[in-house]
Amino acid sequence: MPTELAILADRRPGISGLAPGALEAWFTDRGEPAYRARQVADAVWGGNATSAADARTLPAARRDELDASFRFDTVTDTELRLSDGGLTEKALHRLADGALVESVLMHYPARGRQRERHTLCISSQAGCAVGCPFCATGELGFTRDLETAEIVDQVRHAARRLATNGKRLTNVVFMGMGEPLLNLDRVLESVDALNDRHRFGLGARHITVSTSGVVPGIRRLTALGPQFTLAVSLHAARDALRDVLVPLNRRWPVAEVVGAARDHARATGRRVSYETTMIGGVNDTPVDAQAMADLLSGDHAHVNLIPMNPVAHTPWAASPDDVIERFAATLREAGIQTTIRRNRGQEIGAACGQLAAERAGEPAPAVVARRRDRLIDESAHALRGERSHEPAPAGVGE
Ligand code: SAH
Ligand code: SF4
């Protein structure tokens, strides 16, 4: 085991994050034939190598040099927790600088004509600056952007675990910690690596990126053309309420977010999916259901209603099932395709960020009490339709 200091000092780039051609250049700079890069890539992507020693087709001296230059796995320090009888696997990854991020692997057995699926939910940032108050990651605040390899290696880690049982990963969703569109360059590089048939080789239709509504990021994606499925975290159709639930709404209001998503659907021909976390007595009222129906009616859209996962330090809980059913019925009456998604792995905190939050320790009781009071007060104002004049979260969307 490397010592803690050695881990902290490890600045070697992750090999899975290298752009195609970079490895070739590394070999040719050393007077080696370019095909060596192919041999390493085969070990990294085909063999899922965790160290240069796994690149067996390479001369020993080159393996040592590679080891000195690159990390073959940036998520070596990973702790697993199982739940749902093994159907949900939560991984807490400790990165080289000590930052903690989570990924969650969900197994869906075959049902009827639907084949079995293995979906991995990954993180794009350590923490998140957006600060949605129902989200464990939001409460943690922002630590840093993940490197491309740190994003991709969460996927390679899960793929390795699946391979031991002869299974393959079928879907990747960027719905873990962080706001992917605020780390868009690294997210696009990792999607490239996942999608490239010479690297991970997962079809773009099997990749979903979720955003809380970073409008310039959505517009940039639209200009690039279809890359993956875009999911937008909507949570509320009224600005007064969405300001509270997604503080980024004060920077990009809901009409702008939905406008950008609508343009995206039109330009790419791909349906946008809207996620809504259902919070009892907060965003599940008949008025809110109607507002959402009015906002999305006529769109090429799909709404997913997700009962809120219990999160420490909030005054809120999931909406009751019958309330969610009624909300769904209002949307369906307006012709909007709507599904209700049951939560997975609640007891291990599968809404990403909960394990990391647990490790971060308990905040002082007075801080928790102040936060709860503020949220109760803000949501009461929002339910009456009053907008607050708080600015958007610092450092976001300037
Ligand atoms: N930052 C991006 C992607 C990560 S969050 C985003 O917000 O879209 C992924 C999804 O998990 C979002 O739809 C978010 O609203 C949801 N989520 C966060 N906390 C939750 C909780 N406690 N219960 C249910 N869903 C939650
Ligand atoms: Fe960030 Fe998404 Fe959590 Fe909001 S829901 S705080 S955007 S990770």
Image (cartoon, helix red, strand yellow):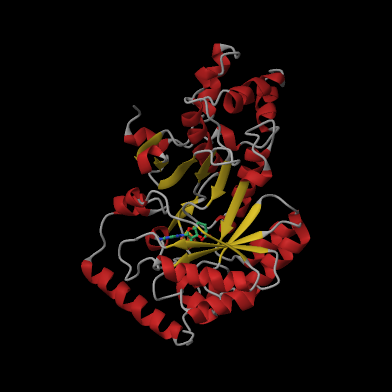
Compared to residue 368, the image places residue 359 above or below, namely above
Q: Quadrant of the C terminus?
A: bottom right
User: What residue do we see at 32% from left, 71% from top?
Assistant: 315
* Corner quadrant of residue 45: top right
Determine the residue located farthest toward the front in the rendered image.
112
Q: What is the quadrant of the N terminus in the image? A: top left
**Residue situated in front as seen by the camera: 366 or 207:** 207
Residue visible at 39% across and 76% down in the picture = 281
Residue at 63%, 23% (x, y): give it: 42
* Image vertical order of residue 134 relative to residue 383, above or below: above
Residue 150 in sight in this render: yes
Image spot of residue 59 (x, y percent): 59, 12
Answer with the quarter of the image where residue 81 lies.
top left
Q: Tell me what residue is drawn at x 61 percent, y 43 percent.
A: 190
As drawn, the residue found furthest toward the left would be 365
Q: Is residue 388 left or right of residue 15?
A: left
Report whether 209 appears left or right of 235. Answer: right
Q: Nearer the viewer, residue 88 or 115?
A: 115
The x and y percentages for residue 30 are: 66, 21
| Depth check, front residue: 137 or 95 | 137
Q: Is residue 394 above or below residue 58?
A: below
The foreground one among 145 and 259 is 259
Count all numbered tags in the image, as a single digit: 0
Q: Is residue 394 visible?
A: no
Q: Position of residue 37 (x, y in %)?
A: 66, 24
